[in-house]
Amino acid sequence: MKKKENENNLEEEKIPAENQENLTDNEETETQETPTDELAEMKEKYLRLYSDFENFRKRTAKEKVELIQTASAGLIVELLPVIDDYERALANAPEGEISEGIQLIFAKINSVLQSKGLKELPAKGEVFDAEIHDCITQFAAPTEADKGKVIEVIEKGYTLHEKVIRFAKVVVGN
């Protein structure tokens, strides 16, 4: 019995010793690969973090420029009906009723708004474009060439730094 127990103990001792050798070989292999793998992984993480930060910085700078450019958009949008009213009054006033001084003031207002990035959208005679035009109604086109084109402009459209701030309200030929 003692012999069997001793043999079992010896076998148990042998297995852990073999396992220990395997473990040590594996640990040595892992420790040899680990620093280079870790370094590569850290470099990859660093590059990703750096590129994310650069993208964030560029996006923030772009948003800041856009904010500065469109900061006056609210005021300009509120001035557009006043400009429309003046243009209607000018078109319907008898000759000489609106003084030259008032016309100069209006021209100055227009030039200031244009210097801030306001542009009138082309409409009459253009092909209808849903991106910049708002179709109020459709009428029969006077000629075949006018089908799908803007026949009349009800209200002018405007852009501010290439962004539409008011769509042109138009009548389209059908």
Image: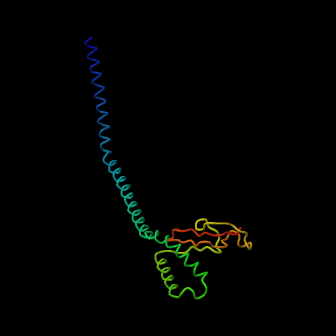
Q: Quadrant of the N terminus?
A: top left
Image: 124 above or below 21: below
Image: 94 above or below 135: below
Q: Quadrant of residue 63?
A: bottom left
Q: Quadrant of residue 12?
A: top left
Residue 39 picture location, percent across and down:
32, 50
From the viewer's perspective, is 23 left or right of 105? left
Image: 19 above or below 104: above
Tell me what residue is drawn at x 28 percent, y 31 percent. 20
**Viewer-proximal residue among 15 and 119:** 119
Residue 153 picture location, percent across and down:
63, 73
Tell me what residue is drawn at x 37 percent, y 56 percent. 47
**Viewer-proximal residue among 172 and 29:** 172
Visual colour scheme: rainbow
Q: Quadrant of the C terminus?
A: bottom right
Name the residue furthest top: 1
**Viewer-proximal residue among 116 and 7:** 116
From the viewer's perspective, is 35 left or right of 122? left
Number of numbered discs present?
A: 0
Residue 22 picture location, percent across and down:
32, 33
Residue 35 picture location, percent across and down:
30, 47
